[in-house]
Image (cartoon, rainbow, N blue to C red):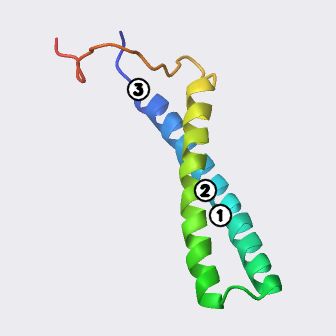
Amino acid sequence: MEDIRTGELLRVWWLFAWRFAVGSFVLSFIVGFVIGMVGTIMHTLTLDQVKVYAQIAGGVVSLFWLLCVIVMALTKRYHGFRLVVVRGDLPLCRSE
């Protein structure tokens, strides 16, 4: 078993970072926009309530999006390596 190279680590980190950032921003914006529009049109929410509900909904949507990003990272075909989940009692660190 080989050690993880810096380039490989950066590729995986970049996949998580940009996909999570862009996806959670877009999805949170959409959810917040919908909450704001519905609350305004129905006259059921004040501006402060819209802000609170949109922030909560954005956080929840981001958590679900994070799960999607993890699945994407695990199923992606990287050049020269792959990510796997291994079941069983394995030590966290290799000692040689």
The residue labelled by disc 2 is 61
The residue labelled by disc 1 is 28
Give me the C-alpha separation between circle 2 and circle 1: 7 Å
- Secondary structure of the residue carrying tag 3 is loop
Q: Is residue 55 left or right of residue 96?
A: right
Residue drawn at the location 48% of the way across and 19% of the way down: 84
Q: Earlier in the sequence, mark 3 or mark 1?
A: 3
Q: CB atoms at circles 2 and 1 under 8 Å apart?
A: yes
The image shows residue 14 at horizontal and vertical percentages of 54, 43
Q: Earlier in the sequence, mark 2 or mark 1?
A: 1
Residue drawn at the location 60% of the way across and 64% of the way down: 58
- Secondary structure of the residue carrying tag 2 is helix
Q: How many marks?
A: 3
Name the one closer to the observer, 35 or 16. Answer: 35
Question: Which labelled disc corresponds to residue 14?
Answer: none
The residue labelled by disc 3 is 5
The image shows residue 87 at horizontal and vertical percentages of 38, 15
Nearer the observer: mark 3 or 2; the answer is 2
Image quarter where the N terminus lies is top left
The image shows residue 53 at horizontal and vertical percentages of 59, 74
Q: Is residue 87 left or right of residue 91?
A: right
Instruction: Look at label 3 and name its amino acid.
Output: Arg
Residue drawn at the location 61% of the way across and 40% of the way down: 68
Give me the C-alpha separation between circle 3 and circle 1: 34 Å
Relative to 59, say whether 73 is above or below.
Answer: above
